[in-house]
Image (spheres, rainbow, N blue to C red):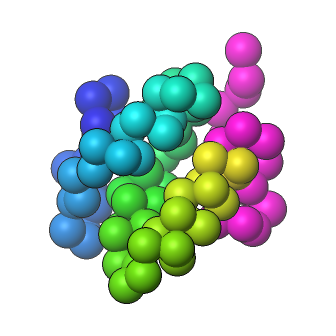
Amino acid sequence: MAGSDFSRLKRPVHRMPVFVRQALTARKLLRAYRARPAYQQNDYLSWIQRAKLPATRQKRLATMLEDLKLGDRYMGMAYRSKKPRG
């Protein structure tokens, strides 16, 4: 979670599970993940980890990966970064 300021988050900060890091690394999306605001990074991790079933966890992980790949979505909803892409 280096590079993001998590100090302002009011919710508990979630650590990245190994399987999430592996998926981000394998798809070369770790940089896109880290470019997102701290609250989004934390929300994605919380959302994935709250899933009760492994299939749901994998579906949520797939949604996060697709969002990051496309760059214009956040948890399946429209998203536009405030930072210019470059």
Closest to the observer, 2 or 15:
15
Q: Can you see residue 43?
A: no
Closest to the observer, 67 or 21:
21
Q: Can you see residue 56?
A: yes
Q: How many marks?
A: 0
What x and y, as percent, mark residue 75?
64, 65
Magenta span: helix, strand or loop, mainly? Answer: loop
| Residue ID at (35%, 78%) | 50
Residue 76 included in the magenta stretch of the image? yes
Which of the image's four quarters has the C terminus? top right
What x and y, as percent, mark residue 68?
66, 43
| Residue ID at (62%, 56%) | 62
Please report the bounds of the magenta region as a residue range: 68-86
What x and y, as percent, mark residue 1?
29, 37
- Is 44 on the left or on the right of 64, as rendered? left
Q: Is residue 8 above or below residue 65?
A: below
Single out the residue that lies furthest toward the bottom. 52
The quadrant where residue 74 appears: bottom right
Q: Is residue 35 above or below residue 50?
A: above
